[in-house]
Amino acid sequence: MNRAKTIIVSNRLPVKIVFNGEQMIYQSSEGGLATGLGSIYKDGDNIWIGWPGAIINEETKQEKIADDLTDRNLSPIFLTEEEYNKYYEGFSNETLWPLFHYFPSYANYSDENWNMYKAVNQKFADAVLEVLKNDDQIWVHDYQLMLVPQMIRAKARNAKIGFFLHIPFPSYEVFRLLPWRDELLKGLVGADLLGFHTYDDSKYFINSCQRILGLTTNSNQLFIHDKPIIADAFPISIDFDKFNSLANDPLQKPHEENIVKRKGKAKLMISVDRLDYSKGLINRLKAFDKLLEQNPQYIEKVVFVQLVVPSRDTVKQYADLKEEVDKMVSNINSKYSTLEWVPIHYFYRSFSIDLLAALYKTADIALVTPMRDGMNLVSKEYVACKTDETGVLILSEMAGASKELNDALVINPNDSNKFVKALVHALEMPVDEQRQRMRSMREIVSRFNIHHWVKVFMNRLEDVKVLQRKLSVR
Ligand code: ADP
Ligand code: F6P
């Protein structure tokens, strides 16, 4: 049967290849996009096109990987070392990432990287065009592939194309710094529907299209030669049931008991991040240091578990950050540790979802305090695992999630005094208040879950096509 399918396209596949000597192992990828869409791509004939996380040059290996992944509805795109360096590390993570996260001084503008970004975007677009059939819908994801919508449109005029940006879209004043701002916007408006995490992000995008491309707009509609396309907010979420059930699973008990035994009478605070300057690790460590300095009564009464997963570690700012975090953790630990107690337990590696869920469930406080974040799924995963409705979430107002999780203790990570106050508030919060706040956050995350997100986005994509037909532009 020839059914319409959804083609998902993203830089990274939800599965990555790691090597154990010569042996190839398939593991789940970390990061919001992979974990967010990981639950839904397997339906029907859907297919997910992306990079499998390792540079593989040998053709026989590439064929084997493609073969292995077909059963999982995954179609790998292989990157050469040069493509990886210039498109992924270079333009994506040394130019777009810092600029879109409001770190313009970290942004590096290189023509060579830009040219490679164009070439690799074309490679992804060609892979889509190869499998595209008439009624298929295409869903392109994230900042690594912003030119792909228009590249597909150029060859498949009537294609149904959605695009979702998983990171913030910056205000016009920041976006305009990019030498290739026109080309990027022209690439994006090849889509019929453009999704952002927050209302502000979508407005900033529309504003840039007006000012840079001179497009006519009407509320969330933009007109491309009279054809309407839409830009709107679609806050991403998680598979609430998956995390909730895991947290309720009796098989998880040994993990949880182990953590509870180890923390003893102390309160457990956790943070879970990729190692990234946008995640606010330094400000968080400073606030923790200040908490202990100003409130010595918490010595031996609080344990901070910081899980950090390695990320983009060949990019300079990431390598520098790793050194800084190592140093700060060691300074704080040497300053406050006692023979019975170490304040920070710092892990620089990936954790299994079982262990992650057990940590979320047993943690009294979760610290999610990025300097800037598109959404931040960790905050929602924590809430989903707090099945007894206790626990406190401290959340940065710079994360998209703060627009939905109003019952968190919302802070500005640059305001160290208020940060410390929020830590004290969290440590002292009565259980009744915790329950009231957590219950309402759980309701939000459970209702507006990942399935809801996919459904709303896809329905809206269909609506845009109907609208375009009605205006008989096509
Ligand atoms: P980003 O997309 O910027 O990485 P998110 O908070 O949206 O940020 O998503 C991060 C995802 O990566 C979450 O699903 C989280 O569970 C996972 N993750 C982060 N750190 C680790 C870790 N140390 N081990 C396993 N998973 C992790
Ligand atoms: O959510 C933003 C994002 O860049 C995703 O596109 C990506 O999967 C995740 O963070 C992790 O980054 P990377 O793929 O560079 O490891």
Image (tube, helix red, strand yellow):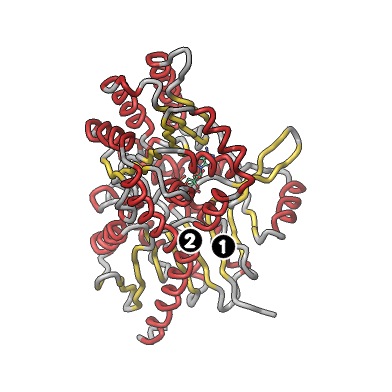
Left or right relative to 4: residue 360: left
Where 64 falls versus 339 (above or below)?
below
Residue occupied by mark 2: 450
Q: Secondary structure at mark 2?
A: helix
Nearer to us in this view, 122 or 229:
229
Q: What residue is rendered at 56% in x and 56% in y? A: 38
Q: Secondary structure at mark 1?
A: loop
Residue 115 in view in this figure? no
Residue occupied by mark 1: 40
Q: Position of residue 124 (x, y in %)?
A: 55, 58
Asked if the residue at label 2 sits under 8 Å from ligand 1, the reply is no
Q: Earlier in the sequence, mark 1 or mark 2?
A: 1
Query: Between marks 1 and 2, how big is the CA–CA gap?
Result: 8 Å
Where 125 falls versus 19 (above or below)?
below
Q: Quadrant of the N terminus?
A: bottom right
Label for residue 137?
none
Asked if the residue at label 1 sits under 8 Å from ligand 1, the reply is no
Nearer to us in this view, 338 or 344:
338
Left or right relative to 174: residue 166: right
Q: What residue is rendered at 46% in x and 41% in y? A: 90
Q: Circles 1 and 2: CB distance less than 8 Å?
A: yes
Residue 332 in view in this figure? yes
Nearer to us in this view, 279 or 430:
430
Q: Residues within 10 Å of mark 1 (few under 14, many from 20)?
A: few
Residue type (three-letter) at the residue carrying disc 1: Ile
Which quadrant of the figure has residue 147?
A: bottom left
Q: Quadrant of the C terminus?
A: bottom left
Where 163 falls versus 104 (above or below)?
below
Q: Position of residue 129 (x, y in %)?
A: 58, 67
Q: Residues within 10 Å of mark 2 (few under 14, many from 20)?
A: many
